[in-house]
């Protein structure tokens, strides 16, 4: 098996060289020459496809790239009748077929005429490497660089030979570095070479964070040559220091991002519970409504998923906010002066809302898609990459927080709501429209919960239980921060997030959660009114 | 604190080692002084509410405490009763009880009773129960569980009810009382507790003239056996009961003396009484004297 | 200005006000007196709309007040200083005062959205304590704040429920002066509940005596004599 | 009675409603179909639905209610093992009959229960075999929700893998609480574990609500199926329907059924399901097939026994065969577990699975795992002469309970 | 007899429901038990064993509600973690019952419960020792919740944690315990908990007579706890407790160490919850970490609120009513019962501010005013 693969690779590499040179001089190869191969591909069973692909790759020209890519993405179809392949594309929710080489749209074809060319994991692996090999000669330096990097784990003789050849002609600094790294890896692993050469190569390697490099170095620590071993150990040590630094940053980011989720989930409660004093057990359901709103928005505009979030945010604010106003007007407003009863009523409301979405949307989770600009991650270096969705949510949480603080500090609503919650009758006597203030404030808190739902829909289940899973954490955060103090909520959310994430690696997720709870319990003994307590005579 | 300091602290002569002190030693008033307040300082976010305050109150005295709004009278009571921690200074009850290291309940059990500026009673219990709770009894958990009202206690409560004029309302919920009635009830709770030292913050606020008079009588009759410290802004009332008056200003003592001395004190007139008030008071006094002579 | 016709009021099962009649003349200072618990505070709260009445009518300049919500009444120009001060404890002094600004700017078109300097002239201590929480103030300071807060509304009628409770003598005097001044210079109508005869006599122009939820005597302040006092105010 | 009563004991509210509601509908659909065919023994079948609300003690109470108040002849119900364990004593006390349709950890065989879901040897072991043999995986992450099914499954797998020569440090085990939603660190750890040179795979026994955030995190951190494939035992079409599967293409699941398998039976079943739910987008899944097989077998057994009497039906059940929806036939064995084929599928971007591997024939469900020290000598056989759920082949006795 | 009556009705105002309550409770219990044991199953008056166990469960919940009410209704401490004490009591009983299985478990291990066998444990963890003794297990059923309540209460009340802070801390407590008991390493059976019990004190748990006996014992204990609690709360201590609820600082200023009162009341309440849990487990047949779930604890508070907090009888009635409603609703309308239950909670809050007992009070007040009016006319 391995033997066969090696020989195959050999062939490819050879062809590669030849065709590479050839294509430089004569330009485009004839795509038509691929037709029989493609027909074969269309007819083949999955397990017979690799040899065919090897032959296709042998064309070794950027012209086959679209084909390989389409196949990798699972969008390549076979028209049985015409013995041709064709790509399926989708724009704005419409599916159409076009030639993968010429981009010519073939309008006459529909789903029934074509048959998907399926791939499996092995083939996908193969395709990725093949694409990388072809892309070594791409015009774009960044494409070349990532091609080199993705080949690091697969450095056979032929690839190395290609790299050596390309290295001398390479002008772009980054690509050259990457190639040097690959070549150094090769050099370092060659036991027949002089130790001094190898050690020099190892030295080059010690600046890299690539995991393949580390794996190679780890292997080298078991080398026969003592000098190589010690060089490898030193290099590993050096790498480990940097890796640890980045790992710390990584962990911090995890903590911040968990904190931002907690912040989003609890910030609405900080208003309805913290400021208004309603023990709002239906807070979680307001989050849930926001998440379902996102789902509905995406249903309405399936072709504009990328923009759907911008519609969903105000929509969720409105939906949850109006629901909040409704609840306030119908129920909460009759419970003034009876804060404990709000617990009972809002618990009832939360049951009703849960069952309502179960009835309308079924008990199953709903699918909310991630806009393309929020998916994937920002790869800073091989050991540190930050996921975009978390980054956006972190920024979003802070933004919502700031806006809220401004609303409460700079508008009369903030002053009025505090006055009303402290002495309703006196506020009335001062001309404060208490009903309006109550409704607006509860609406605001609920609306913000709705916005949190939009963010959470990007991370977790959109289902009837969504609210339940955040309500306890939300109360914990608000109370830990100090009821009625927005800044407290912010600090509490991030403290708990970071604490959890720094505990998790040593204790595991379950124990970390327990320890954080115990920590909160003990902390409250020290500061019975939370992190930022209300002070003074009146607070007693 | 260094070890030396803590050792010194431990061997201080003026205090009994806590583990040797009997739980409830009698208040030692050998020197006739029942309350020592020395060098008391307290500030809230930089604002000095109490500023090196010194005050001594004799056993059995009726002391009036006056002073401008915000002078620190209520705060002083807060410190004495353990509600507020002070920054520095000492407060001793008799010679042997350092009040600063006791909590509210212990201080109350020592026999220091307090009436608040804003009347606070147990709103959801009857007037009778409010008084029963205040009785001087063993207030630990188990004794309370097994205690029954004795006939003497019931008599005592009835007596108090009569004194405070709420006999008719004895089974009314305290929360339903009017403001003035709550004032009375709170005084009644003090009486029922039979304390050694009474701290009374503005007892006649919201009372009619006649009620004020009655209160004055009541407080005068209490003095002697008990020590009473009264805070009040009603000068007529203060005059009618006061023997010694202490004036606080900006957290420290501004003047101390008899009512007449105080009323003619320039500083006091300036910061507290006001020119006219002082003269008005003088007039009413002469009027009252005339009335008496008639 | 304000007239109250046959008003009944109940707390749960117990009736407090019994067919109470009261007429407040514009520009007057009416002093309501009576023993503890006769229903003075209850009456004022009913006027403010903080307690519902079960029967009768309260009108102000012809408008039926008792159909209006409490906050509307503030806009009609009633300022209220409650017994026990009812400061917003966790708001700063400044915020306590600012609460009334919207009503003020609605009532007096011209005035800017600022706390009128007049208030601080009357009660300088409020200026010193501007950023302190209302609840932290001493009792007397709170009382001054409560009066100041009501004055921010620029009211036509000022209702004061024992405004001198816990206030130092020179300020009591000053409050009296303020009331008289506002009454004389701006024609402010004042309803005052007061227990202290001295103050009532000095400030009040009319008196009403209450007993058991009814007005039992009404006259000019000069005519408040010892018999009446004995009969309705003594214990 | 003039009707035959079928009790449905699936949670319609609470945390498990998400999975169990579908099974309630499946039972109702089967009842409907059977009634259209004229019922059973000439009587109509009547379904009695109750809601145990994802509350485990309520399963016992509602089970008792079904058996004594409603006097049902059979119960279809439960999803989690704990709910089954809760109702089990009631079934045994009142001699009821229950069909349990979910893959589970095994280590149980009651006379009153028929287990139509997969035992570990019908899911976990074949999946690991596939990973090692076909994908060349040498390192394993066993990630699960912290409860008995994942714990037991992972114990079995650990023993099995070690038996196959996988070293201790090449197995990483991780447990998370129910509904765990913050997977950042764990996915990042998995990435690290997988980047150390050897081909790595994740064997996931993560259950229920925790899956969606787990897969979303996998997608976002770019854990691709070629690098580190994840094979799951609790993720089916239904779970995927709550997810955007584009970033997850190629990850795996092991089941006895996939909706995508094209057989006439399956097509008919899917069609009936869409008609019954009036929703052409509703997916089908493995526990539904298990319910389907269970119901058919029960109907056949009742017909064969000519009565709904539990003892008679129980004996008639053994040896019953019903065609699988994916081809072949399922057989009810003496140990109350089924023989079924095992399929492994890759997730596709339309939320379906593509079968990439399947067992040659059917695998018989093993009640007592051969890889656990406590149970390797135990077998279950409900036919004479053994008639026991936990017969020790060494000591030739029935240990412990013997109903 | 008259002395007994006198003793029952001695307590003041709050105590006047005691005698009717005890009589009705015990009367119904005895009648139901007799109807189950001595009537033929087809009799119109036969009470099924299902009903008996259900009633038994309700009574356990009533006892639990009583515990919550004592602390919340009378002392103003809103505990959102009483489920923890209930569950701990339940686990103590569960451990005893587990040990009674002996070698009748599926693996036939005489010492280790089944879940330990298949997790490959070699010996019984130390905290399981002694649990095979009934008296010891029962001691633990009250001691463990009591001790936890003492430690928690001592810490919290001494540092003056009050109001929502205390509520959320109790919630954190039960939540932490929930997570902990889910862990299989803890040795309490993880998510599955303890189940498959066989017998108690040698009596077969499956037998009708045992079930009836458990039911009777629950009823009697409920009555005893009710009377004792009534006594305590109508003593002066009860007044102190109410005073603490109204104004804790005022109570301190008249000399009561309120933290001690609160701690002991909290412990008392936790012990009752523990007893309720211990009685609950043999009747429902399972104990698992789900009982620690914060939502459960919130529900308990809601039973009390529905019944009327601050009246012991209200707590009992609330627990019975809500749970009966749940049983009925889940069977009658399995798809919509949450609507009904949710609406019930909302309506009760809006229209019965003092719960069902408040309704009784409202009706009485109405009758009184009507009568007053008439007498005036
Ligand atoms: N917790 C606090 N935070 C900030 N300032 C405080 C606090 N408590 C008291 N003060 C301030 O300390 C000063 C003294 O207050 P205190 O209540 O003792 O005055 P008082 O003498 O009782 O006045 P009055 O006669 O008006 O009741 C006041 O200026 C008050 O604003
Ligand atoms: N919330 C309440 N519930 C029931 N009764 C009340 C309530 N508030 C006051 N009352 C009763 O109403 C009566 C009148 O009370 P109100 O406060 O109006 O008296 P007042 O004349 O203002 O007395 P004071 O001079 O003491 O302030 C009192 O007898 C009191 O017992
Ligand atoms: N049995 C299961 N999947 O819990
Ligand atoms: Mg004061
Ligand atoms: Mg009044």
Image (tube, coloured by chain):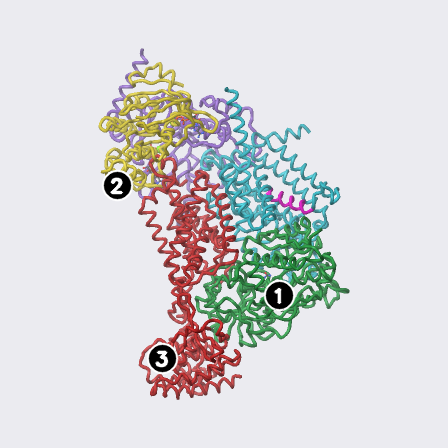
Chain colours: A red, B purple, C yellow, D green, E cyan
Q: Tell me which chain the residue with mark 2 is part of.
A: C
Magenta region's main secondary structure? helix
Q: Position of residue E356 (x, y in %)?
A: 55, 37
Q: Are marks 3 and 1 in contact (CB under 8 Å)?
A: no
Distance between the alpha carbons at the discs numbered 2 and 3: 68 Å
Residue D377 in sight: yes
| Tag in front: 2 or 3 | 3
Distance between the alpha carbons at the discs numbered 3 and 1: 50 Å
Q: Which residues are magenta?
A: E49-63
Q: Is residue A353 magenta?
A: no
Classify the position of ligand 2 by quadrant: top left, top right, bottom left or bottom right: top left
Q: Which residue is pictured at 24% across the width and 40% down the height? A: C112
Q: Which mark is residue C113?
A: 2
Q: Which mark is residue B24?
A: none
Q: Are marks 2 and 3 in contact (CB under 8 Å)?
A: no
Q: Tell me which chain the residue with mark 1 is part of.
A: D
- Tell me which corner region of the image, top left, top right, bottom left or bottom right, holds residue A330: top left
Residue A387 in sight: no
Q: Which mark is residue A138?
A: 3
Q: Which mark is residue D118?
A: 1
E372 to E310, vertically: above or below: above
The residue sitting at the front extreme is A108
């Amino acid at each position: 098996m391995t033997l066969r693969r090696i020989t195959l690779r050999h062939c490819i590499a050879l062809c590669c060289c030849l065709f590479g040179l050839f294509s430089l001089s004569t330009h485009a190869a004839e795509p038509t020459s691929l037709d029989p191969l493609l027909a074969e591909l269309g007819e083949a069973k999955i397990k017979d496809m690799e040899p065919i692909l090897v032959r296709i790759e042998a064309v070794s020209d950027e012209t086959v790239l679209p084909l390989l890519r389409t196949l990798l993405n699972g969008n390549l179809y076979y028209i049985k009748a015409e013995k041709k392949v064709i790509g399926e594309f989708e724009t704005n929710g419409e599916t159409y077929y076009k030639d993968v080489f010429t981009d010519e749209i073939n309008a006459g074809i529909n789903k029934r005429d074509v048959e998907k060319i399926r791939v499996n994991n092995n083939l996908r692996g193969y395709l990725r490497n093949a694409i990388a090999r072809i892309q070594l000669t791409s015009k774009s330096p960044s494409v070349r660089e990532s091609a080199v990097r993705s080949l690091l784990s697969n450095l056979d003789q032929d690839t190395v030979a290609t790299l050596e050849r390309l290295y001398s002609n390479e002008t772009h600094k980054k690509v050259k570095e990457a190639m040097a790294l690959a070549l150094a890896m090769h050099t370092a692993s060659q036991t027949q070479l002089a130790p001094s050469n190898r050690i020099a190569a190892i030295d080059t390697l010690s600046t890299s964070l690539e995991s393949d490099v580390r794996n190679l170095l780890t292997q080298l620590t078991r080398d026969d040559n003592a000098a190589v071993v010690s060089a490898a150990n030193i290099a590993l040590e050096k790498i480990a220091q940097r890796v640890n630094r980045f790992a710390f940053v990584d962990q911090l980011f995890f903590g911040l991002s968990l904190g931002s989720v907690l912040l989003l989930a609890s910030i609405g409660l900080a208003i309805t519970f913290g400021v208004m004093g309603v023990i709002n057990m239906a807070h979680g359901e307001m989050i849930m409504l926001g998440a379902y709103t996102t789902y509905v928005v995406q249903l309405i505009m399936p072709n504009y998923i990328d923009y759907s979030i911008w519609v969903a945010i105000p929509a969720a604010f409105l939906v949850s906010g109006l629901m909040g106003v409704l609840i306030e007007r119908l129920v909460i407003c009759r419970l003034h002066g009876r804060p404990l009863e709000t617990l009972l009523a809002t618990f009832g409301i939360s049951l009703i809302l849960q069952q309502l979405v179960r009835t309308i949307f079924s008990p199953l989770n709903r699918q909310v898609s991630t806009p393309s600009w929020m998916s994937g991650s920002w790869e800073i270096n091989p050991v540190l990459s930050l996921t975009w969705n978390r980054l956006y949510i972190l920024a979003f949480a802070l933004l919502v927080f700031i806006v809220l603080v401004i609303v409460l500090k700079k508008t009369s609503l903030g002053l009025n709501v505090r006055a009303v919650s402290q002495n309703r009758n006196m506020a009335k006597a001062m001309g404060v429209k208490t009903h309006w203030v109550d409704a607006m404030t509860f609406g605001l808190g609920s609306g913000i919960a709705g916005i949190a739902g939009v963010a959470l829909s990007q991370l977790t289940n959109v289902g009837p239980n969504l609210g339940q899973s955040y309500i306890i954490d939300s109360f914990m955060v608000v109370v830990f921060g100090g009821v009625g103090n927005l800044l407290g909520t912010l600090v509490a959310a991030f403290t708990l997030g970071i604490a959890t994430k720094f505990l998790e690696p040593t204790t595991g997720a379950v124990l970390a959660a327990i320890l954080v709870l115990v920590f909160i319990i003990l902390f409250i003994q020290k500061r019975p009114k939370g992190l930022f307590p209300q002070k003074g005579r009146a607070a007693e | 604190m260094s070890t030396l300091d803590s050792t010194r602290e431990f061997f201080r002569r003026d205090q009994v080692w806590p583990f040797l002190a009997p739980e409830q030693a009698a208040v030692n008033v050998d020197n006739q002084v029942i309350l020592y307040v020395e060098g008391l300082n307290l500030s809230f976010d930089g604002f000095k509410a109490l500023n090196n305050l010194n005050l001594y109150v004799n056993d059995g005295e009726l002391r009036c405490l006056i002073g401008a709004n915000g002078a620190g009278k209520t705060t002083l009571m807060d410190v004495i009763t353990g509600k507020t921690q002070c920054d520095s200074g000492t407060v001793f009850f008799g010679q042997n009880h350092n009040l600063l290291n006791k909590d509210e309940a212990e201080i109350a059990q020592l026999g220091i009773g307090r009436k608040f500026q804003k009347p606070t009673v147990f709103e959801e219990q009857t007037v009778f129960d409010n008084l029963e709770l205040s009785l001087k009894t063993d207030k630990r958990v188990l004794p309370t569980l097994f205690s029954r009202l004795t006939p003497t206690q019931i008599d005592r409560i009835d007596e108090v009810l009569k004194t405070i004029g709420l006999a008719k309302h004895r089974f009314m919920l305290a929360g339903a009382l009017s403001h003035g009635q709550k004032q009375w009830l709170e005084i009644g709770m003090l009486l029922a507790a039979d304390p050694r030292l009474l701290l009374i913050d503005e007892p006649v606020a919201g009372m009619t003239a006649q009620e004020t008079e009655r209160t004055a009588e009541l407080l005068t009759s209490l003095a002697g056996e008990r020590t009473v410290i009264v805070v009040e802004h009603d000068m007529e009332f203060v005059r009618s009961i006061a023997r010694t008056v202490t004036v606080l200003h900006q957290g420290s003592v501004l003047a101390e003396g008899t009512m007449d001395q105080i009323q003619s004190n320039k500083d006091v007139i300036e910061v507290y009484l006001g020119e006219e008030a002082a003269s008005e008071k003088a007039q009413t006094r002469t009027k009252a004297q005339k009335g008496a002579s008639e | 200005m304000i007239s109250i016709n046959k008003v009944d009021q109940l707390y749960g099962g117990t009736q407090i006000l019994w067919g109470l009649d009261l007429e407040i003349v514009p520009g007057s200072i009416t002093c309501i007196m009576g023993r503890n618990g006769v229903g003075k505070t209850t009456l004022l709260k009913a006027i403010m709309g903080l307690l519902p009445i079960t029967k009768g009518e309260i009108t102000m300049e012809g408008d039926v007040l008792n159909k209006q919500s409490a906050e509307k009444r503030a806009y009609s120009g009633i300022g209220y200083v409650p017994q026990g001060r009812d400061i917003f404890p966790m708001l700063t002094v400044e915020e306590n005062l600012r609460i009334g600004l919207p009503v003020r700017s609605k009532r007096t078109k011209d005035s800017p959205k600022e706390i009128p300097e007049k208030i601080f002239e009357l009660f300088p201590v409020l200026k010193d304590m501007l950023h302190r929480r209302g609840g932290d103030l001493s009792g007397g300071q709170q009382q001054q704040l409560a009066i100041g807060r009501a004055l921010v509304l620029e009211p036509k009628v000022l209702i004061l429920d024992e405004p001198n409770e816990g206030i130092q003598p020179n300020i009591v005097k000053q409050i009296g002066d303020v009331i008289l001044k506002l009454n004389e210079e701006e024609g402010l109508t004042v309803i005052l509940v007061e227990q202290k005869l001295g103050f009532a006599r000095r400030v009040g122009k009319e008196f009403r005596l209450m007993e058991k939820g009814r007005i039992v005597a009404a006259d000019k302040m000069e005519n408040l004599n010892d018999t009446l006092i004995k009969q309705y105010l003594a214990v | 009675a003039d009707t035959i009563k079928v009790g449905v004991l699936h949670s319609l509210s609470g945390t498990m409603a998400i999975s169990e509601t579908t099974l309630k509908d499946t039972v109702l659909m089967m009842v409907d179909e059977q009634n259209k065919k004229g019922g059973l023994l000439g009587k109509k079948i009547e379904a009695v639905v109750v809601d145990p609300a994802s509350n485990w003690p309520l399963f016992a109470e509602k089970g008792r209610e079904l058996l004594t108040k409603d006097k049902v002849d059979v119960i279809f119900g439960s999803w989690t093992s704990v709910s089954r364990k809760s109702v089990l004593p009631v079934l045994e006390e009142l001699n009821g009959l229950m069909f349990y349709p979910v893959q589970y950890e095994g280590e149980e065989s009651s006379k009153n229960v028929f287990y139509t879901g997969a035992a570990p040897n019908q899911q976990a072991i074949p999946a690991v075999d596939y990973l090692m043999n076909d994908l060349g995986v040498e390192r394993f992450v066993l990630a699960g929700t912290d409860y008995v099914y994942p714990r037991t499954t992972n114990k079995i797998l650990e023993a099995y893998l070690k038996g196959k020569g996988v070293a201790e440090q090449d197995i990483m085990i991780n447990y998370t609480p129910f509904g765990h939603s913050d997977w950042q660190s764990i996915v990042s750890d998995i990435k690290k574990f997988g980047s150390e040179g050897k081909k790595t795979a994740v064997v996931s026994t993560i259950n229920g609500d925790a899956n969606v955030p787990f897969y979303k995190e996998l997608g976002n951190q770019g854990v691709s199926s070629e690098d580190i494939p994840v094979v799951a035992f609790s993720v089916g079409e239904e779970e995927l329907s709550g997810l955007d599967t584009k970033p997850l293409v190629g990850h795996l699941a092991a089941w006895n059924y996939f909706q995508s398998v094209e057989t006439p039976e399956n097509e008919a079943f899917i069609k009936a399901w869409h008609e019954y739910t009036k929703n052409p987008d509703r997916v089908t899944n493995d526990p539904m097939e298990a319910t389907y097989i269970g119901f058919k077998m029960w109907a056949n057994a009742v017909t064969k026994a000519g009565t709904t009497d539990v003892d008679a039906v129980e004996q008639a059940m053994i040896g019953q065969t019903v065609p699988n929806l994916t081809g072949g036939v399922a057989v009810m064995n003496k140990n109350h577990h089924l023989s079924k084929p095992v399929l492994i599928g890759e997730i596709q971007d339309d939320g379906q699975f593509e079968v990439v591997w399947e067992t040659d024939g059917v695998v018989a469900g093993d009640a007592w795992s051969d890889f656990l020290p406590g149970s390797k000598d135990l077998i279950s056989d409900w036919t004479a002469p053994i008639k026991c759920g936990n017969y020790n082949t060494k000591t030739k006795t029935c240990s412990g309970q013997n109903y | 007899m008259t002395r007994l009556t006198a003793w029952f009705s001695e307590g003041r105002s709050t105590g006047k429901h005691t005698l009717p309550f005890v009589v009705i409770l015990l009367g119904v219990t005895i009648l139901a038990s007799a109807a189950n044991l001595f009537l033929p199953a087809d009799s119109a008056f036969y009470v099924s064993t299902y009903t008996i166990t259900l009633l038994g469960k309700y009574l356990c919940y009533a006892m639990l509600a009583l515990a919550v009410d004592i602390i919340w209704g009378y002392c103003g401490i809103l505990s959102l973690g009483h489920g923890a004490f209930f569950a701990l009591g339940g686990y103590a009983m569960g451990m005893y019952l587990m040990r009674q299985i002996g070698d009748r478990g599926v693996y036939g291990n005489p010492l280790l419960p089944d879940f330990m066998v298949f997790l490959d444990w070699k010996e019984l963890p130390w905290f399981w020792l002694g649990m095979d003794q009934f008296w010891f297990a029962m001691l633990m059923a009250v001691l463990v919740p009591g001790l936890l309540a003492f430690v928690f209460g001592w810490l919290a009340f001494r540092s003056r944690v009050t109001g929502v802070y205390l509520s959320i801390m109790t919630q954190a407590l039960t939540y932490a315990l929930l997570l902990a008991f889910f862990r299989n390493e803890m040795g309490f059976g993880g998510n599955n908990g303890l189940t498959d019990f066989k017998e108690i004190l040698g009596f077969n748990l499956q037998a009708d007579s045992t079930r009836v006996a458990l039911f009777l014992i629950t009823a009697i204990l409920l009555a005893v706890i009710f009377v004792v609690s009534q006594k305590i709360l109508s003593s002066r201590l009860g007044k102190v407790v109410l005073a603490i609820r109204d104004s804790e600082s005022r109570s301190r200023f008249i000399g009561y160490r309120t933290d001690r009162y609160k701690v002991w009341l909290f412990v008392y309440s936790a012990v009752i919850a523990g007893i309720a849990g211990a009685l609950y487990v043999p009747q429902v047949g399972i104990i698992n970490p789900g009982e620690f779930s914060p939502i459960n604890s919130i529900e308990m508070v809601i039973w009390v609120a529905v019944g009327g907090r601050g009246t012991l009888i209200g707590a009992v009635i609330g627990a019975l009513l809500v749970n009966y409603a749940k049983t009925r609703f889940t069977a009658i309308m399995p798809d919509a019962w949450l609507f009904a239950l949710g609406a019930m909670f909302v309506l009760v809050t809006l229209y019965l501010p003092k719960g069902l007992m408040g309704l009784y009070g409202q009706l009485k007040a109405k009758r009184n005013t009507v009568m007053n009016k008439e007498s005036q006319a």
